[in-house]
Amino acid sequence: MRKVAFSLMVAVLLAGCASDKEQKGAAVEERKPTVEPVAKPTVEPVAKPVVEKPIVGNPLKDPGNILSKRSIFFDYDSSIVKDEFKPLVTAHARYLAQNADAKMTIQGNTDERGSREYNIALGQRRADSVKQMMLLLGAREAQIETVSFGEEKPHAEGHDESAWSQNRRDDIVYPGE
Amino acid sequence: MTSRYAQFLLALAWLTFASAAHSQLNIEIIGGGANQVPIAIVPFKAEQSLPQKVTDVVTADLYRSGLFKMIDSGGLATLPSEPADVQYQTWRARGADALVIGSVSPISNGNWDVRFRLLDVAKQAQLTGFAYQVSTQQLRNTAHRIADAIYEKLTGDVGVFGTRITYVVKNGTRYELQVADADGYGAQTPLASNEPIISPAWSPDGTRIAYVSFERKKPIVYIQSLLTGGRTVLANFRGSNSAPAWSPDGKRLAVVLTKDGSSQIYLVNADGSGLARLTNSGGIDTEPNFSPDGQWILFTSDRGGSPQIYRVPVAGGAPERLTFDGNYNVSPRYAPDGNSFVFIQRNNGRFNVAVQDFVSKQTQVLTDGGVDESPSFAPNGRIILYATEVRGRGILASVSSDGRARLRFSVTAGDVREPAWGPILKGQ
């Protein structure tokens, strides 16, 4: 067995040397093209579905959808919804109007200044302010609960206006979020 | 406060912090009162072997009240523990008006006999004295009772050294409701949560605390028993539920609900039954507090356009506005005698503790911290406990009701806020 293997190696080595040389004068066999018959020369076309319609992603989670935006920010000591947040409030109100089973909680928040309990009341007023706007836009009372976190759940932990302006806000939360 | 003084205070706070790191709350003395009584406290006989030296606690209690000047009791060949041993001329020479002597002796079952006498140095007579039989665990509380007895005899006021306080510690995202002795020792944690806890309020008998917890993603009012740890939901209506306040008889509470619209004050029995609306404004009515006689409720309302303090009869009726200075007066709490109330007043963006007299209507601003919150009276009306900040960290502080004596409490870690001083326990 070992002897056979050795012979094969030698043969391979020799063959290798031989292939380096140009092969001249070797005859080339010519083949004529032929077509073999097949049973079915046709091809199935690409199948089209009987019904085709898009599956809608959750608009509440779609980063491209305004419904994925959930925070409304307020001026100091104010619960007035600023113009820049009206499209957001309107979109969520429409969502509630179009989805009778949908519910949301609006969580009102304040900056850290002043009494914690008074800030609970101010945050509640901010949440109620957005709720009132949504009711005017077709949402129903039973769909929206407003609660307040006062100053207890800041977005930003700083102690200056740049932090405070991020903390004076309403957050819209849907069930299970 | 000058910056140099502030640096000194910080250094002092650090020293206090370093030397007593085993306790959760440490206390720093910022100012003294006037008319201090000079008192000498002789180390009690045989207390050196105790794990808790009684006279250290008594001395610290009396010193921190700001009403006593501590006279050195060292350098004596023998320490008197009985009236017959006392050489009054020694104490007169040291300037002491009052002298405390006592002893601690082991009795059966590992318990101790602790006794003390308070002596009038000028009259060479006993003013008061008590003997106690207590366990080792009770030694610290016994020292507070001794300090209370001395305080009461020499000032005519009720002592509050044996009472407790509650407050909330925030450490990262962890919130703990804690209960500690009035000197900050022995902190216990009846509730811990990863959501905020605010507005703890003691029941008048000191056995329960009502508070607001956000553990269910909205403010809900609970009542928790400190004896069993069990708790009940007092108010969980649609919307926000907050600001619990006990009636003096402990049978019902005032709470703030938003179930019918804006934040309004309701009365409810302690078992959650019998809900009735008290205030009717289109604006904010919050932070209720019962008068000591149970007839009135103080509260904060913005019905006049800015948050101001009002009072309304508990039986119902027209609210009366009480504060007119400035455009932000909040967090009212009655003094125990019902003659004045403490509150937070904003001036030029700074929030400070103020007291207003019901009769004279005069207001006195007591603090200059600038970010002061949540004031509450000690049950003897002499001290106001409140929350403030030092370098962005929440701490507790107290100020005497005349504004003279001040203390700061600090914890080893975390933010401390929402303090409330507990009652004097009957038959304690």
Image (cartoon, coloured by chain):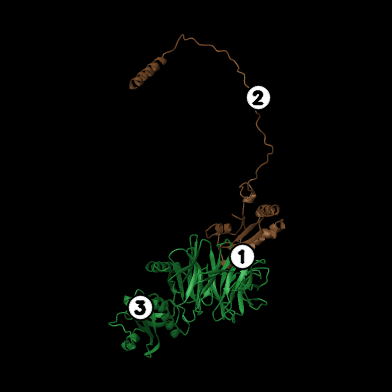
Residue B25 occupies which quadrant of the picture? bottom left
Q: Quadrant of residue B83?
A: bottom left
Residue type at mark 3 is Asn
Which label belongs to residue B109?
A: 3
Q: Report the chain shown in green.
A: B
> Upstream in the sequence, badge 1 or badge 3?
3
Colour chosen for chain A: brown
Q: Would you say B13 lies left or right of A177 here?
A: left
Disc number placed over residue A42 in the picture, else none:
2
Give the residue type that dot 1 points to: Ser
Q: Indicate the chain on which mark 1 is placed.
A: B
Q: Are marks 1 and 2 on the same chain?
A: no
In this rendering, do the residues under marks 2 and 3 share a single chain?
Answer: no
Q: Is residue A170 above or below residue B311?
A: above
Element at badge 1? loop
> In this orientation, does residue B72 appear?
no
**Dot 3 alpha-carbon crowd within 10 angstroms: few under 14, some 14 to 19, many 20 or more:** few
Image quarter of the N terminus of chain A: top left
Disc 2 residue type? Answer: Thr
Residue at horizontal 61%, vertical 49%? Answer: A61
Instruction: Inspect this view and state whether residue B315 appears.
Output: yes
Picture mark count: 3
Q: Position of residue B307 (x, y in %)?
A: 62, 69
> Disc 1, disc 3: CB below 8 Å?
no
Measured along the vertical axis of the image, is residue B133 above or below residue B256? below
Residue B10 lies, in percent from the top left, at 42, 67
Residue with the mark numbered 1: B240
Give the secondary structure at mark 3: helix
